[in-house]
C-alpha cells in the first residue's frame, strides 16, 4: 500500500496545489486496490512561502499544531476517516496564513495514545503544552523534547503503536 501511495503521489504531483483533491483520488486508489480493512492515515501540507500560505489536508490523522512567532499555539483539527474506508469520504482542507518562524507539528496517534504503567494516556494537551513551552527553539530541539517527554511518560511500558513526528520551522 505504501508503494502504491508513493506512486500515486508521484503521478499526481501536478495536482498537489490542491491537497484535498489528491487525497480524495488516493482514497479511491486504496479503497479499490487493497484488501479489505487496509486503511492509511495521511496528511499533506503544501507550503507556499512566497505568498505566506499553508494548505493542509488530512485523512485519519490527529490534529496538528502550529506555533506562531508570538508564542501562541493553534490546534488544526481536520477530521476525516483514513484512506481506504468503504464509506463516502470528503477530505477536509484548510488554508492558513504563515510566516517565517512559525512551526508546524504533525504527529501520528502513536504519540498521543501512548500509555504509561498506570494506563494513563499521554494526550493531545500534553503535546500542545510542549509545543507552547519548547517551540521557540529549533525544529530539532522541539522534536527531541516531544520524543523525550513521550519516552519519560511511557517509562518501562512497551510502545503500543508506531510513532511518527514531523516538526517544520518555516524560514
Image: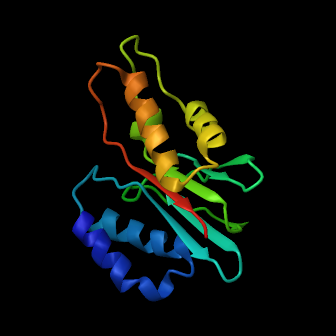
Residue at the extreme bottom of the image, as rendered: 14
167 on left or right of 170: left
Q: Position of residue 137 (x, y in %)?
A: 59, 50
Residue at the extreme right of the image, as rendered: 70
Residue at 52%, 55% in the rendered image: 139
Which is nearer the eye, 56 or 97?
97
Q: Position of residue 33 (x, y in %)?
A: 25, 67
20 on left or right of 26: right
Which is nearer the eye, 95 or 24?
95
Count numbered badges in the picture. 0
Residue at 26%, 25% in the rendered image: 158
Q: Position of residue 18 (x, y in %)?
A: 57, 78
Which is nearer the eye, 132 or 93?
132
Q: Is residue 139 visible?
A: yes
Residue at 75%, 47% in the rendered image: 72
Instruction: Establish if 63 lies above or below 126.
Output: below
Question: Where, quadrant-wise, is the N terminus in this rendering?
Answer: bottom left
Question: Where, quadrant-wise, is the C terminus in this rendering?
Answer: bottom right
Q: Is residue 60 visible?
A: no
Q: Position of residue 17 (x, y in %)?
A: 56, 82
Quadrant assignment, res 155: top left
Quadrant assignment, res 96: bottom right
User: What scheme was used to colour the molecule?
Assistant: rainbow
Amino acid at each position: 500500500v505504501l508503494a502504491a501511495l508513493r506512486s500515486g503521489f508521484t503521478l499526481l504531483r501536478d495536482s498537489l496545489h490542491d491537497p484535498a483533491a489528491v487525497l480524495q483520488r488516493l482514497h479511491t486508489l486504496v479503497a479499490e486496490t487493497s484488501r479489505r480493512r487496509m486503511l492509511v492515515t495521511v496528511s499533506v501540507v503544501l507550503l507556499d512561502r512566497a505568498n505566506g500560505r499553508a494548505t493542509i489536508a488530512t485523512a485519519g490523522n490527529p490534529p496538528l499544531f502550529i506555533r506562531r512567532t508570538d508564542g501562541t499555539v493553534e490546534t488544526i483539527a481536520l477530521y476525516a476517516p483514513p484512506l481506504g474506508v468503504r464509506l463516502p469520504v470528503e477530505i477536509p482542507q484548510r488554508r492558513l496564513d504563515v510566516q517565517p518562524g512559525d512551526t508546524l507539528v504533525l504527529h501520528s496517534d502513536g504519540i498521543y495514545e501512548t500509555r504509561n504503567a498506570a494506563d494513563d494516556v499521554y494526550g493531545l494537551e500534553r503535546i500542545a503544552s510542549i509545543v507552547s513551552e519548547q517551540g521557540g527553539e529549533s525544529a530539532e530541539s522541539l522534536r527531541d523534547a516531544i520524543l523525550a517527554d513521550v519516552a519519560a511518560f511511557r517509562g518501562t511500558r512497551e510502545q503500543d503503536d508506531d510513532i511518527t513526528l514531523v516538526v517544520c520551522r518555516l524560514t
